[in-house]
Image (cartoon, rainbow, N blue to C red):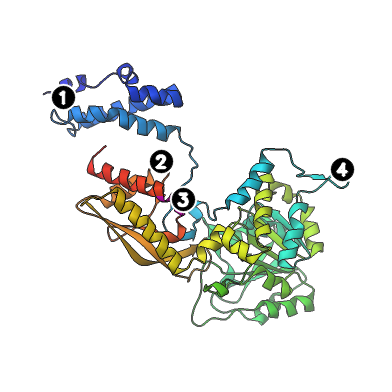
Amino acid sequence: MEKRNLFSLIPKVDELLKEPLMTKLLDKLPRVVVVDSIREEIQFLREDIKNNFITEKNIDKRIEKLPRLIEKRANKKNSFKLKKVINGTGVVIHTNLGRSPIDEEVMKNVLEISSNYSNLEFDLESGKRGSRYSHLEKILSDITGAEAAMVVNNNAAAVMLVLSTLAKEKEVIVSRGELIEIGGSFRVPEVMEQSGAVLVDVGTTNKTHIWDYEKAINEETGAFLKVHTSNYRILGFTSSVSIEELYELKNRYSIPLVEDLGSGVLIDLSKYGLEYEPTVQDSIRKGVDIVTFSGDKLLGGPQAGIIVGKKEYIDEMKNNPLTRAIRVDKFTISALEATLKLYLDEEVMKEKVPTINMLTLSQGELEDKANILKEKLKYNMNDKDINIEIVDDYSEVGGGSLPLEKLPTKCICISLKDLSVSKFEKSLRNFKIPIITRVYKDKIYIDMRTIRESDFDTIVKGVLEALNEVKGVF
């Protein structure tokens, strides 16, 4: 049959709109979305005929599939661009996947605040205008031991505000080995430049001594900046200056000491078998004047830049005009306050803060999860073209935290017989709730550390649909 005759077999838009599946689709989706999806699928079919992918032998089968293809396309078109995904990568604080997930109980507080009026900037005691920073200051001070606290929209903004307040048009001394890139090409020197401070780097990449700092001090010095290199390690012939040494120097010369901790851990993770990471409380106890850290990394809350330390400095920051440009809204405040309340009881925090919970899962708990998911998968797809097994592997902390930490984990490993692994992975990624996995040596790995049991049924449906898609079955 000639191509023009094949083209004549393609149903018209109006004909397809009368299909029962399209009628159901029109009841729940905007008509324009359905019609656009029909036209796009028809165009794809035309292109396949033109390129000889569709012939007289398979044209009927392809036309029969059209309603299902249109339904899938229309649902995808109508879905939100920002959507829930299932993180099967094993990277706990996955920057590309939104970093730390937030506990459902925390989100109840966010819903309560965001769907109603609130006392965001209203003092209930005096009946007068209040400050949005007051809602978090006490709990942050209680947990960290700092005199005062405030919160802005992320840690880069926090560092910029601190330096703009304490050292604008002044010099800030920092070790060359601590001039890190935060991520997404944002670098400490560039953040410092935007703050109006003048960078003075001392020492070398691998070695900095206390006398390097002291030699750089002059009448223009505005602050010492200590940056915790949370996202990398330099090993071998190295030395760095401790907080204790800088504390003595800052007291001798009356120069503020600022520390950017980045990850912002509030508990000693080493008690749970992880590498020790300096806590915010450690820095405050050692005499650091101002500490900044992230809310959505090891703290396990929403994106935020948290600033704790001496009241005199933080009061100045609250009055800095820059503060308004980087302030947080009611969503962040309500989520962060509810998360911080969990830290008042460490056992509750370990159970309820998803990031900490995932990092501290035992091998037994991971194996139990893996066995449950494996059985669900095997029960739903007894297929000779797919093999499902449990394997040992390693998870990562992620988010620029604990870069050398490898967490033993259990993974569901999927191998396919004579089928495309790349198409299978893409299908999982394009499922209605995207399932993000990792691929290694032509096998799909789903890490149990970052998978919630409530998502097991979704994973089963996604794997089954991906298998059918790569096999050409609908």
30 vs 345, left or right, is: left
**Amino acid type of the residue that numbered disc 4 sits on in the rendered structure:** Gly
Query: Can you identify the residue that label 3 sits on?
Result: 454
Query: Can you identify the residue that label 4 sits on?
Result: 127
Q: Position of residue 392 (x, y in %)?
A: 36, 67
Magenta stretch, residue numbers:
452-456
Query: Can you identify the residue that label 1 sits on?
Result: 3
| Residue 167 shows in this picture | no
41 vs 116, left or right, is: left
Quadrant (top left/top right/bottom left/bottom right) for the N terminus: top left
Residue 269 quadrant: bottom right
Query: Can you identify the residue that label 2 sits on?
Result: 432
Residue occupying image coordinates x 33% and y 52% = 377
Front tag of 3 and 2? 3
- The numbered mark, 1 or 3, whose residue comes first in the sequence reads 1
Depth order, front residue of 8/289: 8
